[in-house]
């Protein structure tokens, strides 16, 4: 969130408001972590 807001030139608070306004969930944009096993 911090990087996205900084890139857009807005505060994190403004970004949260925009996400809420348009029904966007930040979780949808988080990288998916996969569990890896070491052999």
Image (cartoon, rainbow, N blue to C red):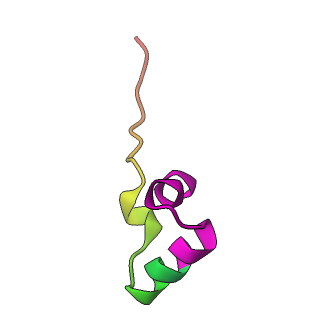
Q: Which residues are magenta?
A: 1-16
Quadrant assignment, res 33: top left
Q: Residue furthest front?
A: 9
- Name the residue at 42% across, 35% down: 35
* Residue 34 located within the stretch drawn in magenta: no
In x, y percent, where is residue 7? 46, 54
- Image quarter where the C terminus lies is top left
In x, y percent, where is residue 19? 45, 78
Q: Main secondary structure of the magenta part?
A: helix
- Name the residue at 62% across, 74% down: 13
- Name the residue at 38% across, 47% down: 32
Q: Residue furthest top?
A: 39
- Does residue 34 lie above or below 30 as drawn? above
Q: Residue furthest bottom?
A: 21
Quadrant assignment, res 34: top left
- Name the residue at 42% across, 54% down: 30
Question: Is 14 positioned to the left or the right of 33 in the image?
Answer: right
* Residue 14 located within the stretch drawn in magenta: yes
How many discs appear?
A: 0
In x, y percent, where is residue 23? 39, 84
């Amino acid at each position: 969130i911090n990087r996205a807001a900084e890139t857009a030139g807005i505060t994190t608070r403004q970004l949260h408001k925009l996400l809420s306004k348009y029904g966007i969930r930040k979780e949808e944009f988080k990288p998916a972590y996969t569990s890896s096993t070491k052999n």
